[in-house]
């Protein structure tokens, strides 16, 4: 197949490149905002599992770029991921694990002691092709995102995350109903009809009386009778039905579209800075797994969280700090990254072109 094959088969992939989005998934958040007005009046937002930055771009373009210089001072957007990504105007990056309580503390510190008004997550595990297993792993990731959201989300806030519709998804819906008064399943038109992918949109966050934020995955297993209660306080049924909202537009994600006469092929806006299996990929260039094998060990644990600085249009490589008691690390230019509150100001102030 030629380079243009995917542009024909995937209209949203083509549109993403033409409109400057890093990923086609940007349209899913745009369509959610069009349907639910999620970004209206929001000044503090968190993008979990953010790399390569498609949803962070949406937050930047809708919350940060349209405002005046004075109004931008109030906008705070933080993108959290263990992988790095190229800088985006108005977005501060935190390289950290979303299952760590220290990550939640760092986010609240970035907001100056306040909590987020919106938390979004488009994270997904690597699919195996086994639908039951993939749906289970996606549910665990969504619960991890919901767990940290209960720490960092303010009363009345909103949450959006990816889910795979499967047999046991009701357990995830029950968890969402514990913390949000309004929960529904959303299917963007940019998401293929043939895919089990959907998104949960939860609004009007309210922490239950007496609930202490914790890892909901652990709570689920340790105290199932508490974790599976719904908002009425009664034991949840096996099947939970939520309102289903679908977005419609002029394009169908499952159809192929002919290329226009003036069509010109474009490369991806921003390729990933770090591959998920970069070390393995490098090794397989010289070793055939058909005839040989190798072992990759990660003996030294990375710091719980460390900040990736963004400055102008330069992309800084992140290296672990020499002293593991410090969260910040040194950049490739031998500059020490500033504290997270200083990063907030730096991320908002620079006006140079983003590294796309």
Image (cartoon, rainbow, N blue to C red):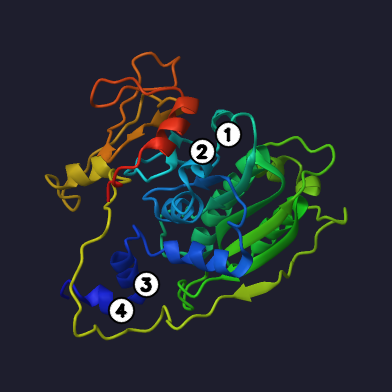
Say what secondary structure mark 2 lies in.
Answer: loop
* Quarter of the image where one finds residue 105: top right
Identify the mark nearer the N-term, 4 or 2.
Answer: 4
Q: Marks 2 and 1, Cα distance to the nearest angstrom?
A: 12 Å
- Give how far apart the Cα atoms at labels 4 and 2 are: 42 Å
Name the mark nearer the viewer: 3 or 4. 3
Residue 226 seen in render: yes
Residue ID for mark 2: 73
Work out how far the residue at label 3 is from the one at label 4, CA to CA, in angstroms: 9 Å
Secondary structure beneath dot 1 equals: loop
Q: Is residue 339 left or right of residue 103?
A: left
Q: Position of residue 225 (x, y in %)?
A: 81, 48
- SS state under label 4: helix
Q: Which residue is mark 4?
A: 9
Q: Are marks 2 and 1 in contact (CB under 8 Å)?
A: no
The one nearer the camera, 192 or 106, is: 106
């Amino acid at each position: 197949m030629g380079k243009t094959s995917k542009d024909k088969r995937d209209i949203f992939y083509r549109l993403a490149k033409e409109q400057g989005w890093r990923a086609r998934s940007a349209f899913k958040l745009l369509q959610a905002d069009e349907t639910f007005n999620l970004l209206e009046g929001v000044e503090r937002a968190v993008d979990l599992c953010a790399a390569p930055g498609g949803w962070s771009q949406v937050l930047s373009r809708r919350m940060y770029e349209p405002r005046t210089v004075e109004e931008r001072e109030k906008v705070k957007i933080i993108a959290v991921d263990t992988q790095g990504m190229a800088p985006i105007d108005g977005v501060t990056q935190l390289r950290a694990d979303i299952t760590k309580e220290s990550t939640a503390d760092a986010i609240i510190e970035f907001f100056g002691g306040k909590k987020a008004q919106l938390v979004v997550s488009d994270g997904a595990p690597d699919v195996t092709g086994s639908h039951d297993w993939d749906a289970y792993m996606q549910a665990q990731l969504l619960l991890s995102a919901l767990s940290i959201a209960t720490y960092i989300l303010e009363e009345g806030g909103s949450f959006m995350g990816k889910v795979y519709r499967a047999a046991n998804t009701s357990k995830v819906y029950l968890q969402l109903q514990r913390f949000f008064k309004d929960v529904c399943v959303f299917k963007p038109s940019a998401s293929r009809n043939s895919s089990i992918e959907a998104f949960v949109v939860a609004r009007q966050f309210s922490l239950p009386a007496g609930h202490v934020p914790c890892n909901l995955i652990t709570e689920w297993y340790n105290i199932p009778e508490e974790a599976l209660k719904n908002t009425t306080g009664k034991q949840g049924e096996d099947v939970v039905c939520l309102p289903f909202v679908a977005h419609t537009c002029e394009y169908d994600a499952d159809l192929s579209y002919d290329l226009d006469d003036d069509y010109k092929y474009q490369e991806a806006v921003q390729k990933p800075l770090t591959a998920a299996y970069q070390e393995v990929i490098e090794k397989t260039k010289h070793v055939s797994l058909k005839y040989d094998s190798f072992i990759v060990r990660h003996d030294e644990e990375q710091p719980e969280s460390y900040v990736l600085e963004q400055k102008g249009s330069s992309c800084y490589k992140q290296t672990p700090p020499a002293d593991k008691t410090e969260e910040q690390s040194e950049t490739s230019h031998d500059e020490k990254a500033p504290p997270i509150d200083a990063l907030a100001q730096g991320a908002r102030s620079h006006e140079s072109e983003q590294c796309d």
